[in-house]
Amino acid sequence: MRAKTSLRAVSPPAEEAELDGSMAFSVLRASSARAKTPQQRMHSPPAVEDISHSEVPTPNSTRRIHVSSVRVSTPQRMASPPPDDLSDDGPALVLGRSASAPRLRGAGTPKRLGSPPAEDIDKPGETCPVGTAFIVLQEMLALKYGIQLDEHDFTCKAKARCTPEERLSALRFVEALNAEPALKVKDACCQRLIQLRFATTIVTTFAELQGFMRRWPGTACAIAAASLGGASGRTAQLVAPYREAYGGTGGIVAKTRAKSYGQVGPLFTLTEETFHGAVVLEPVIEYVLKYQSETAVMLELQVPSESDEFRSVSTGGNAEAELASRFCSAMADLTSTTGDLEGRATASCLLAKELMCRHPKASMVQQAACRALGNLLPLCRRSLPAQHTSAALESVLAAMRRHSKTCEVLEAACSTVASATASWPDLQAVAATNGATEEIISAMRRFPDRAELQAMACGALAGLAANHPMNQSTVTGRRGIEVILAAMDRFGEHAGLQTMACGAFGNLSANHANNQAAIGAAGGLQRVVTAMNTHCRDPAVLTSAMGALWCLVKRHPENLSLAGKLKAAEIAASAVQQHPGDAALRSMATGALQCLVPGLAEAMAGASAAVSSAPPSARPSARPGQTPRAPVR
């Protein structure tokens, strides 16, 4: 029985079928032949990149067809005929594209090979957090130790440690990398295993980030959250800033990794408006391990030493930092004098802020700059723009976070907060937003035996709470009353601390019923009366204590009753008699006595009206602190 076999060459893909721009193969019929064995069946032709200079293999009975790159001039039949149209003469050899094949380049644009489906492509502007972190890690390791890591190994291990939600936050992402077990990553040669830990520095202001860019110019040292114009659905994406923008525009240029394909993305320019915060990473190599296959033992190698370049920048002990410290100290001394210094104070305040940003790890610069700003900010309240004022206070609070174990820096920072925030609502709001209350109370608990720090911290809490209900509640919620009471008990003979502590109680309880009750229940009223008795000859302590007494008992029956038992009215009257020429003390004592002595306010108001209605010759003459005498008739 004869077997008829239809031999048809498979059409090559459209992308590979381009010969000289476009080419169409006509249908070529081979002579009839009988297929004796299955091995004689014709297979698919080779790839088209070789077909222009090769022969199409055919059976023995089929003549050879040489295909050249010359354009075929018979485009009448562009597709294979239907099977029922084939003649019985023999099989038909078809070299052409089928009706369902993609069109050639001349007829349209082909689909690109390897493109992901449309639903898998991320939205424009989205970055890869893991890739961004690897940029920073790789560049900082190269600067610090001179080694490189294997990117694929780090990417796999980082993704296994962090959830997608953690990767959206720079701080949470780094905390996940630092979690146990310790992160171990292969080096670029895959010969050693590097155990890493990340030392972090939280950056909350754009000016502070600029300081790090000037410290390590050209090196990506931080993971920053920024608003990218093309990212929709998310507020911020992670980028790797590495230098300041050219041309003095004030921006910061950052490297990115595209999330859709994982490769290097376009550069992005950070501005103060698009900046959301950053975390500076400093990789620390804890162990270097190497597996010895002969003995099946993991060897511990020596940890590479830090480079001289990195060490000189990190310590902050260079000549420039020393010069900055001396300059800030000189400014603090100069601005403490009297005179019209508003213009000079504004320029000096900006310079001090800039030096703090340039030398964030130099504690001596931070301490001197905080001292200078403490004297400068109150002088330039009207002339300094609000954004620079806020940036200056943010730099002070950043110094408290970064140097939380340096008592001198904390003391200078608390002094600045105390002098700058009192009755300045804008700075009080900035301090509340940047966690000033938490930093101050934490410093008081960390250094309970440092009297000057405790005094400055009490003054800072008093400044934050002055006529600011939110800060009043925040201090109480953070157990600030407890640390103030502990400081008053520990340093009962310290007049400055007692003055600041009484001022803090007064500002915390002013027009705040909850704080009045909390301070009274904790024993604050007893401490105020004790301070008045101990420092009865110090007008500053007495004035501050009178103000606290006034605010604690005003419209509060429980505290008023307690003050009566403590004989606060007699102590207040005695203080006025001992210091008759102190107008501030007399004013505070009058307010407190009006609350402590029932009917005193009405009697004083009636006496004042009677004196004002009498003729001038009948009015008694009196000096402050003296009891007026009735005229002789």
Image (cartoon, grey):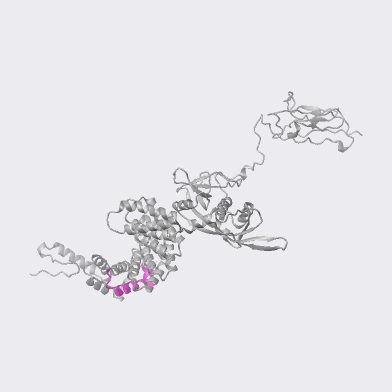
Q: Is residue 613 above or below residue 61?
A: below
Q: At 11% from the left edge and 62% from the top edge, which residue is drawn?
A: 616
Q: Main secondary structure of the magenta part?
A: helix
In the shown orientation, is residue 384 left or right of residue 304?
A: left
Quadrant of the frame with the N terminus: top right
Question: Visible in this render: residue 594?
Answer: yes
Q: Position of residue 631 (x, y in %)?
A: 10, 68
Does residue 433 appear in this view? no
Q: Nearer the viewer, residue 567 or 28?
A: 28
Residue at 62 percent of width and 42 percent of height: 118
In this view, the residue farthest toward the top is 73
Give the image location of residue 598, x and y in percent: 25, 70
Q: Which residues are magenta?
A: 516-539
Q: Is residue 76 left or right of residue 336?
A: right
Quadrant in which the C terminus is drawn: bottom left
Q: Magenta includes 518? A: yes
Q: Position of residue 409 (x, y in %)?
A: 41, 62
Q: Nearer the viewer, residue 312 or 44?
A: 312
In the rendered image, residue 207, in percent from the top left (x then y), is placed at: 44, 52
Q: Left of 26 or right of it: where is 331? A: left
Which quadrant of the view contains residue 410? bottom left
Q: Where is residue 81, by image quadrant?
A: top right
What is the count of numbered marks?
Answer: 0
Residue 585 shown left or right of residue 125 in the figure: left
In this view, 585 is above or below 76:
below
Verify whether residue 568 appears in magenta: no
In the displayed orientation, state which residue is furthest to the right.
Answer: 1
In the image, residue 271 above or below residue 579: above
Image quadrant assignment for residue 13: top right
